[in-house]
Amino acid sequence: MKIIVDAMGGDNAPVSNVRGALSAVRELGVEVVLVGRGEEILKVLKEDGVDDLPPGVEIAHASEVVEMCDNPATAFKEKKDSSLTVGLNLLKNGAADAFVSAGSTGAILSAATLLVKRIRGIRRAALAPVVPTGAGGAVLIDCGATAECTPEYLLQFAFMGSYYAERVLGRPEPKVGLLNIGVEESKGMDLQREAYALLKQAGEAGRIHFVGNVEAREAVYGAADVIVTDGYSGNIFLKTMEGTGGFLARQLKAMFRKSLLTKLAALMVSGGLKQFKKLMDAGEVGGTALVGISKPVIKAHGSSDDFAIKNAIRQAAAFASAGIIEDITENIGHMRLPVGGMEKI
Amino acid sequence: MKIIVDAMGGDNAPVSNVRGALSAVRELGVEVVLVGRGEEILKVLKEDGVDDLPPGVEIAHASEVVEMCDNPATAFKEKKDSSLTVGLNLLKNGAADAFVSAGSTGAILSAATLLVKRIRGIRRAALAPVVPTGAGGAVLIDCGATAECTPEYLLQFAFMGSYYAERVLGRPEPKVGLLNIGVEESKGMDLQREAYALLKQAGEAGRIHFVGNVEAREAVYGAADVIVTDGYSGNIFLKTMEGTGGFLARQLKAMFRKSLLTKLAALMVSGGLKQFKKLMDAGEVGGTALVGISKPVIKAHGSSDDFAIKNAIRQAAAFASAGIIEDITENIGHMRLPVGGMEKI
């Protein structure tokens, strides 16, 4: 298993990217290709006392870097020798099994769609993070790749999310729920009502395990293994979750810092607090899968440290070995509406 | 100040409704009209050792009750002698200053809109709860009254939310933010982009203090005093917040219950834990204002206990004395688009 790592993307690049990649090689038994400015990558290695490239580590030189200020839609074309473009071309040409970047989400999405291409028949790629829930986590699909969706996109997200939950999270018969503002079939806008009909049909045909509409609160509590939604609502869901978690973590911190007594109390529950922190930590999961592209791409969090990069590489390896892209390809016939749309079904 | 209280709506009716109303009379110096089945109301009073109606408490008999299984759109018409219909007619006829109910949100919304009517020129009433944020709370408008909105609705929500934040939360020049999936003007769907233009214009005219798009995470952290959004997204925001808060509270509880040592730690931070609980407790605020109706209506949480009902009555009194409806009426000219919509502005 060989993973291409964008050495230049993210707030802590190239240091964390290089260190995380080396940890992955040592601990996970994968090979990595570090893509980026060779001299900068070597400098990080040298500073860490690594004089020769360890076995399993390659460097692919790329002189440019896609920055946050570049136009995400065109950056990969304007900067043909960027780590993003070079890395994705390596992936496309079969030089490795998966690609990881902590760079700009928009740029990765555009570049992956236009260079590596979507799976044939898939209308839109989706960002599918695993969010913490009362049932040990759920795949949220989409969380922002496509703000405005059609019912057919949501149908495809449901299938893709279901394969991901089954193969990567190890959930047999993953429960697929449609994010909505009530459980009744009539709830939501036209998008949700039409998607409901499609998902119900797919459920009745035994192709996915559709559990109906799920409200946001129940989704957090763990009512579904796959939370299907358009990118706009999915983004609101994800960011509200992050915000509320962060807000409460701050309140908790303030509570424990109040006095000597409360600091002592913090020590007494330190094991629990660590677990609590782990639960809310995006770095634990590593990154967000970009599902629907013909090869595995993982977007790591922009603020990824060494640990988060290593975990994103772990996730990329799991994605690549899971056979999800093959699943999608084989079942694409069930995920498409006849031309003419809803009326024909 | 006289508040009409639906004695029959909610999970704990009539007991909590009657008790909460009596506490409000004693502690807040308001008068109440308890609407519902007279004999059931009197029974609660008797069980609490109250043989004569205390000063400031009236009963308005209504023989029927709107149930959760009734059609929300038509319940008030089908059950003309329900506590909801009788109570809202009293409000309409000026028998009191505001109305509080813990009954079905949909039924209250339909009944208030059709019986009491919207403020002239307001296109849709909105549910505007105060959500906990890093800045001491924000008005979220709308959170589910209207799933599908137009840019004009959002413009009206912005004005109404701003008046509410200023007059009820006491925020001078409330910061009005548009909930979106990025801060740039181009973010979101057509709805958000067109609403952005309208809010920007209202801000430049000095009518509201528009701070631009706010992402859900920053909204929770306290970037705005008023979070403007359509009912679908607002509901996702609110329920995700509630779900995440509830989920983390459970984790915290489990952490403190693990052993004798952790239980001792819980005692040592008990003051902080109480504050923490208070922060997440919907009952503290009382209820959700239904803004845009020509008289003040408060929807209390369905699971309201005595304390929550009392606080909903407090909120109704604050709403009624704040002059918000007058503000809206006077400024309605700035909240309407010329016929023909966006093209004309």
Image: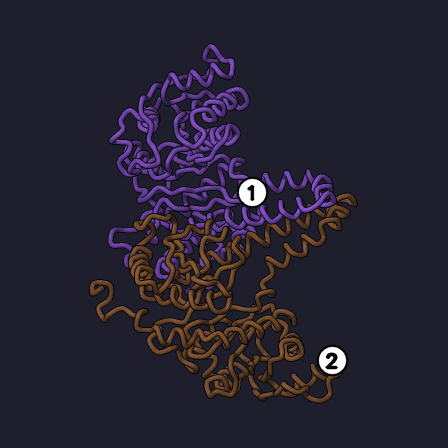
Chain colours: A brown, B purple
Residue holding disc 1: B280
Q: Nearer the viewer, residue A328 or A237?
A: A328
CA distance separating discs 1 and 2:
46 Å
Residue at left offset 40%, top offset 28%: B98
Which amino acid does the dot numbered 2 rest on?
Answer: Asp
Q: Residues within 10 Å of mark 1 (few under 14, many from 20)?
A: some
Q: Nearer the viewer, residue A307 or B174?
A: A307
In the rendered image, the residue lying farthest to the top is: B52
Residue at left offset 57%, top offset 53%: A245
Mark 1 secondary-structure assignment: helix
Q: Nearer the viewer, residue A68 or B326?
A: A68
Residue at left offset 42%, top offset 46%: B141
Q: Which mark is residue A210?
A: none
Which amino acid does the dot numbered 1 rest on?
Answer: Met
Q: Is residue B220 left or right of residue A26?
A: left
Can you tell which quarter of the image residue B67 is in? top left
